Image (cartoon, coloured by chain):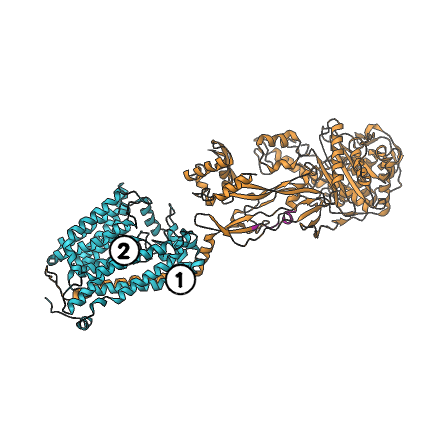
Amino acid sequence: MNPLQLSQEQAQARTRPRTALLFDPLLVLAALGLVACSLITLRGPGKAKMPSHPLYYVEHQAIYVGIGVVIAILISRLDYSRLREYRYGFYAVMIVLNIVVYAMPPILGANRWIPLKLLNFQSSEFGKLLLIVSLSAFAVERSRRLHERRTTARIMLLALVPALIVIPQPDLGTGLVYVSIAVLMLVFAGTSWKQLTALCALFVAAIVFVLAAAPAVGVHVLKPYQQQRLVGFLHPSHDPGNQTYQITESLIALGSGGKSGRGLAHATQTGLGYLPEEQTDFIFAVLGETYGFVGAALVLSLYALMIWRALRILTMAKNLFGTLIAAGILGMLMFQVFVNVGMTAGIMPITGVPLPLMSYGGSSVLVTFIAIGLLQSIYIQARLSSSGKNRVLL
Amino acid sequence: MIQQPADRRSALTPQLAVRVAVVGSFALAMFAIIFFRLWFLQVLSGTQYANAANTNRVRTIEIAAQRGEVIDRSGNLLVESRSAIDVQIVPADLPVAAEQSNLASPPPKDMALYRRLARVLGSSTRRTRCVVISYVDHQAVVHRYRLAAIPCAVAKKQAVLPFANVTVKQDVSRAVFYYLSERQSQFPGVQPQKVFRRSYPLHDVAAQLFGTVGPISPTQVDPKSIHDGIITKGRYKGLSENAIVGQSGLEDAYDKYLRGVDGKQNVQVDALGRFKGNLPPMGAIAGSTLKLSLDIRLQQAGEQALQTSVLSNPGANGGAFVAMNPQDGEIYAMGSYPTFDPNIFTHPLTQAQYDAQFGPTAGSPQFNRAIGGAGPDGSTFKPITATAALESGAWTVGSPYDDTGKFCQGLLCRRNAGGAANGVITLVDAIRVSSDTFFYNLGALTNVDPTKHPGGGALQQWAEKYGIGRQTGVDLPGEASGTLPSPRWRARRNRLEASCDNLTHPTALFPTHPHHKLAPGGCGLADGTNRPWSSGDNVSLAVGQGDVQVTPLQLADAYAAIANGGDIVRPHVGLEVDSPDGSVLQKIQPVPSRHIPINPSYLAAIRTGLREAASSAGGTSADVFGTFPEQVYGKTGTAQYNNQNDYAWYACFVPSWATKTPIVIVVTVERGGFGAIAAAPVARQMLSQWFFGKKGQYVAGKSTTL
């Protein structure tokens, strides 16, 4: 409908780019910067939890990063548009993987992982990517009816189904990531504000139902500890199950870091095991204690850079599919960063979502790198198509 | 915006731009919020959280200070501190913190811990009766629970001191200590604690003086003044609420010297409470050594002699003695019979054991009769009467008195003991033979009109100067002041008796009062006739009978004044506070309370009478001391006490002009009979020990004067 409007950047890109070196350098900078921060920060938890092998987390994280980088480079060379064809397969695999974990031996009381040799494969993490791609494809399929209420309802439903499978694993955090992926996709797919507002109202109603109405009639949607966490967040002084312990220790860790941190040797909250889940969910508290406000601000800036690049790539994409994939990745990144850091800083309730690229964990690192690979692919395809060479690299 | 299924689209549409702007602004706002939150946490409140992190990793273990030793004047060990290990429960650190609300039925996690601990300590897990007393506005409230031994101990302590540690087992082995120390994560809130326990190597010697130590009780400290486990007000300011302090006797009186300063060991622990290393400790400072003026050989001689007297005089069942330097009030020996071995208090006693040792039939062995047992002192009072009569001019040294053996006032006649008639005698003779009629006469002569002189006449004035009816100020808690009867005192007693008789329920003043009115005199404070002070009262007082009540220590102080020329010294058991290495930190040298100006010629006459009583023919204790090589000045006393056997007294001194080591000794034997028979021999054995290092034979006197 609209005449082709080229941004200045795209106009410059018309001069034929050197395709081998074609990628978004700022996104790479953000990702590798975060990886470096993660490897430095993970020395603390390693020292505390694995005194016999203090670099355990650093080494393993480095291996995951190495694999992740290779996969990201490969994916960035692919034309993501081809993935549209596999939408049904992706969606089915996501559902199956998330159901299969229920048959796996529980780890720490949770059915989240499929134990593999290299890593414990966390289905829900990979499910995020599969959901993003398949959901984007479904949306593109209905691109002419994107303003319809039915389309909005279907996309939400397609996200809610895996979310409801994931939440009882229990993995409330990832379930909410699925929902936020779908919401951001709707925002960028052009769903009317009216429908988005109605969606918000539905969410509020659902939260009230889960927290107040359902328990009142004896249906407990949340696990007791999840409910206690919420109560502990809302009323820190009323804390029957000592659920605010984690947040108290996290705040002490962050606060005691001060401006420039206590250093690896003197970070006692980390070193003496006061921080719960210090290598994964509370890695930001470790960072804050060890390297202070300076370290925390640096990492936050890298996330800001990453989110800005995701937004930028979203606008550049050569097609709606690319825009929606970028939107889904943006939703995933924003939710995880804000909820994880917010939880660590005591302004969000405790939900177990990893901090992308900072938290230790193979699944999370690989998924984030695949997401970055997809963003790069969208970027490269956009540059190529705007330079008139509508072709794939591989 | 309509997109083709082929999915080719142009770049930024206005609609997309708006949405990018909205989402971008949202992200920016979130980053801003997080930045400000981090700024607040890390930069503005950083110090506060840094402190929190420090307290997080540090657990403080209190190191009990070794309580100071108590030694006698030549360094013999009387009380020492032996180290032991107790197992304590720290209520706040239990899996579920013990609180007032969950005492009756501890949470399952705590019960599981108690059971594990019981297995380690070998204590019973069977639920038995557990009586817990709590205080609401100083009113005791009794709860009856059924709990096993450990939760019962926790409940008992928690009910009165909510945050204090609870000792659940004393004197555990090293093995248990290490077992529990190494498994702190399995036993949260269980703390093996090194403590010091009192030990008394001489067992029952001077047992009543030392007193006991124990945890601070809720009645000793205002719970509101406890902050973070530290007492901030009052006598125990600065101590931990778990501190062990002296509870009675010398332990109480000299607590601030003996207790030392508890130390602290800060230990770095991880989140599971596992030991991760020591921080520099704050060592405990051991308590100072308290050197007493006691001479332990004299003390032992006195206690043995007193026991011999009690056992050899039928009916006698208690007694006390005091030996003191008349010049400066240093107490050389102070004993009370029956006695006990304080070592038994170092372990928990069952009620049955306690009753056997200290029950109603045991004769109150913990009671220090030498300072707390006040009663009529019989004829040992006579030198005081003599002073009053001479000083007031009622009598003169040389005035003769015809002792007919009988002294009558109206229809009431009083007789000398045994009906003896001594003929014409002077004051010196009267003291020597202890003539009652002579002193009855002085009592009558010194009586005054009670309406004009409610405080009494010369006898009351001089008795008060000598210290009758007032505390000597000895450095021991629990001293009785005794009674000095006067018209005012009698009127007050009559009033009290009447008000007590008319009561119909117990009150604070009369806690044992029954729920009905009593017949006049039913309270036993007065005879119920409401009679005013009479001359007869003064006559009784003149010979130390009737309502007068004197403690052995008061009498010793009075006789010391006669020996030293009128100084009422302040008796003291404490001699020095020494550092643990033996150097003197502080000498305890209280100045005399007062000087009483007695005319030297009167004093000389009284001394002569006392000397002759112990040495000349006819002297009441001459048959005990006649052959004694030192110059003994002594007076017997035999107090009649309601319907009991007479109380035997003997008060004597060897003054500073006769020896380099002057001493005053007072002995009393309850229901022992005559002073010369039951009390004087004890004094003789003590003097023999004092001057010659051996107490010699027990020689009972024969005099049957009062």
For disc 2, the marked residue is: A366
Q: Is residue B419 above or below residue B201?
A: above
Visible residue check, residue A189: no
Q: Is residue A374 above or below residue A224?
A: below
Q: Quadrant of the C terminus of chain B?
A: top right
- Residue B653 in picture, x, y percent from top left: 81, 41
Q: Label 2: chain?
A: A
Three-letter amino acid code at the position of disc 1: Gly
Quarter residue A19 falls in: bottom left
Chain depicted in cyan = A
Do the residues bearing badges 2 and 1 touch, measured as CB atoms within 8 Å?
no
Nearest the eye: B4 or A62: A62
**Region rendered in magenta:** B254-263
Nearest the eye: B114 or B256: B114
For disc 1, the marked residue is: A292
Nearest the eye: B405 or B626: B626
- Residue B407 in picture, x, y percent from top left: 82, 32
Visible residue check, residue B336: yes
Chain depicted in orange = B
